[in-house]
Image: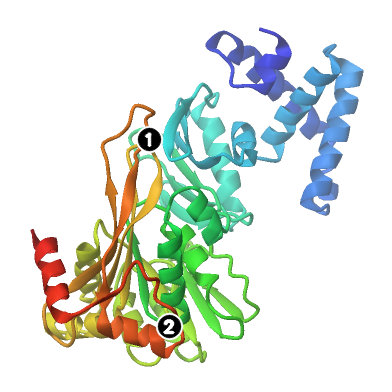
Amino acid sequence: MSLRARISSPEPADGRGEVNRLVAVYRAKLLEEIDLAEMSALAAGDRRIRLERVLGHIISREGPVLSTAERAQLIRRVVDEALGLGILEPLLEDASVSEIMVNGPEQVYVERAGRLELLPMRFSSTEQLMQTIERIVSTVNRRVDEANPMVDARLPSGERVNVIIPPLSLSGPVLTIRRFPRAFTLAEMIGVGSLDEQMTLLLAGFVRAKFNVIVSGATGTGKTTLLNTLSGLIPEGERIVTIEDSAELQLQQSHVITLESRPPNVEGKGRVTIRDLVRNSLRMRPDRIIVGEVRGGETLDMLQAMSTGHDGSLATVHANSAEDALMRLQTLASMSEVEIPFLAIKDQINSAVDVIVQLTRHADGSRRVTEIAVVDSAGREEYRIVSVCRFEARPMAADGRVHGRFVYHPVPRRVAERLHLRNEVLPLVFGVADHEAQLAVRETRAL
């Protein structure tokens, strides 16, 4: 294998040592020649250009003799090691990679199109991996060591990062980088089969008519992506407050306030939780509140906000079905330090939650809206969920894809009337259910 191939791609075992040696040698030479004070004064882009120029002079002066392409690849690898994230840098620039998972120095996985793929690359040592991790966390003024072995942060470029190291991790340092999800339009989501046009019209009506919507799904099903898409349907001119652990939403409206929680500092002080931000947002005169994910006592505050004048709010929750989503909300709300009976929490949920959108990632890696359900219960009665659209999947086909069809059901009359009062048109495929039809749908669901 040529030197160019060994430098530019994940190397086989027999070439890895040579490439790592070259990169280490020229990285050391580069550090000897640069002025660190001068480098720190440069912007990030200018810093890279400066390093590439200095390294080019070193290679011209001292060798080795390389072709133009090989020379460019070696310079790229060395500068990535000195300034960027080493072997991870090309992965971060690959638009097809949605997640990077480093399980110790020996294993690097990526997720592409919903499927995991083991790459034939590795870090030269645990020390090199730890240097990369430390470079990542230092950009957000965090540190990772035995006293603080877990870090959850967001890079300035938007990627979410999780780090866990020994002694908590027995596999060595583990690094997970989730790419910043780009904003999808509803038309694009229709194009990839995540939903269809009729569902899009219904969801658009719900958002514009200020229904409170909960997006539910397991990890990696695309909850944040759908939440971002739905938020794009909010009319211009409303004051929107977004609250997230790691700011990922990319709202296009002009009047958006973005709030992000803050972990404690190295002394264990200064923590600002999602609950703190939800409470504060109520004093900011929001028209709508969007919570990236509820996972604790802030759920109670969010439910109270939804049922006391902040209609049209959006949030996500980890759950495997629409029914599970309501039970999960009930459990999370009970985690508040305010002791409230389950019946009172049930009253809050029935009053606050209007629509649940359930997402699923199928065996072929595709992500779909598998159910749209409306909450048709009130007060402290048991939860009643009416499914108005479901995806009926067929067994995986010979092409390795999961196919199926979307099935529509009538919406409760009160929902149709609420849409009508807001001048929103209910797509004809849904229709309006009378009381007996609703009972039949619920009995079918129970079976």
Number of marks drawn: 2
Mark 1 is on which residue type? Arg
The residue carrying mark 2 is 210
Residue at 59% in and 56% down? 158
Circle 1 crowding by C-alpha within 10 Å: few under 14, some 14–19, many from 20: some
Decide if residue 227 is in sight here. Answer: yes
Q: Which element type, helix, strand or loop, lies under badge 1?
A: loop
Residue 229 image offset from top left, x and y in percent: 51, 64
Q: Which residue is drawn at 45% across and 53% down?
A: 151
Using the rendered view, name the quadrant where residue 442 is placed: bottom left
Residue 446's place in the image compared with 137, above or below, is: below
In the rendered image, the quadrant that contains the N terminus is top right
Q: Residues within 10 Å of mark 2 (few under 14, many from 20)?
A: many
Quarter holding residue 165:
top left
Name the residue beneath numbered marker 1. 401
| Nearest to the observer: residue 20 or residue 222 | 222
Residue 64: % across, % down: 82, 13
The quadrant holding residue 311 is: bottom left
Mark 1–mark 2 distance (CA, rounded to whole Å): 36 Å
Residue extending furthest toward the front: 428
